[in-house]
Image: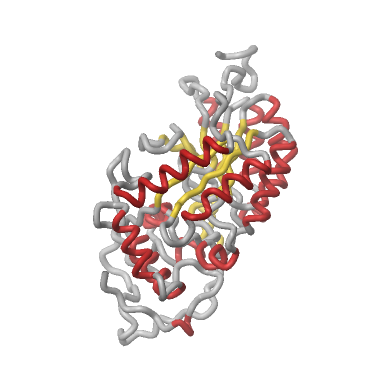
Amino acid sequence: MEEDQEPIDTYKWGRGAQYNTKNRFIDHESTREHIEGIDEWIEADVKTQYIEVFPKTIVNKVESPDVGMMYSMNPYQGCEHGCIYCYARNSFEYWGYSAGLDFESKILIKKNAPELLRKFLMHPKWEPVPIMLSGNTDCYQPAEQKFRLTRKLLEVCNEFHQPVGILTKNAWILKDKDILQEMAKKKIVSAMVSITSFDDSLRQVMEPRTTTGKQRLRVIEELSKAGVRMGIMMGPMIPGLNEHEMHDIMKAAKDAGATFTAYTFIRLNGAIKFLFHDWLYKNFPDKADKVWHMIEAGHDGKVNDSRWGVRMRGEGNIAQLVAMQYKKYGKLFGMNAERWELDGSNFRRPGSQGKLF
């Protein structure tokens, strides 16, 4: 891969991406492709902007068979957490922005999300299968502190007895412990906390605006004690950076009260390939070549793969070793042992007489 690197003294601390990649849907735009260009592309402090939008729908059908969900909803588009590996970066191009700095600094706020969800659930043809909150960007990212859209979506789900799953890496979810506890009693909510590393120096550059691993364990402990079924997402596992932590992550999560797990193997599709390469060589120059080649070895000589059934797990010896670790430690710590599912049998629409199903 050939891409010139920006001098390290212009590194934008607190951001994952260091520049804006080209949007593949826009023919005419200005982007920084090479530092030798005549324009000066060194941004100073990249401030976060909140942009209110009013979409027509909020619930999306998930077509991928690799993801354990059928529907998802995302109150925010773009994510200030700035995780450099995030697959959702590419989807931000559909909104007319870059997958790079734009993704983590221009946050789209779907102000009408609660009303859209209520309208969706009122449709007579809707059958209450679980909806994932969020399947794309973190529903408890910093914007939630100001707009509380996730809380409002949970209130709608609780009113309808609509089952919902949650995936987050932010401790702000604890602010909703009251409603989550109420929903847990109805068996209509479960939550996963994303944990990729306990190495805080790695977290600070890989997931720059997220809470620490210790805080994420506290989330699992507090919510599991409140009766919420808790799990962990170890995604992505990156050979040479964090895959060796799988044992410690699973053990600590189990001790905190987690009962189920999932993981993904790193894949760098679309613009993420360029962003991750730029990030990797700036932050870990001594081992960047090794890490990059191991990622390639996990995808048949490439760093990305779009094939269903393969793309989330990788292939080859390195990916197989990660899969073997996951299986071994999951069995060792008794993860994923129980048969459990969210309950949609009590779903009801306001004003209806009794249960619908």
Residue at figure coordinates x 34%, y 64% from the top left: 292
Asked whether, in this view, residue 17 is left or right of residue 182, the answer is left
Q: Quadrant of the N terminus?
A: bottom left
Most foreground residue, 323 or 40: 323
Q: Is residue 138 above or below residue 33?
A: above
Residue at figure coordinates x 72%, y 41% from the top left: 177
Residue at figure coordinates x 31%, y 86% from the top left: 36
- Quarter of the image for residue 213 reads bottom right
The x and y percentages for residue 180 are 69, 36
The x and y percentages for residue 247 are 54, 48
Q: Is residue 69 visible?
A: yes
The x and y percentages for residue 197 are 55, 57
Most foreground residue, 173 or 336: 336
Q: Quadrant of the C terminus?
A: top right
Most foreground residue, 92 or 217: 217
Its colouring scheme is secondary structure
- Quarter of the image for residue 307 reads top left
Most foreground residue, 144 or 112: 144
The x and y percentages for residue 347 are 59, 21
Q: Is residue 110 visible?
A: no
Asked whether, in this view, residue 12 is left or right of residue 239, the answer is right
Residue at figure coordinates x 57%, y 26% from the top left: 338
Asked whether, in this view, residue 57 is left or right of residue 254, the answer is left
Number of numbered markers: 0
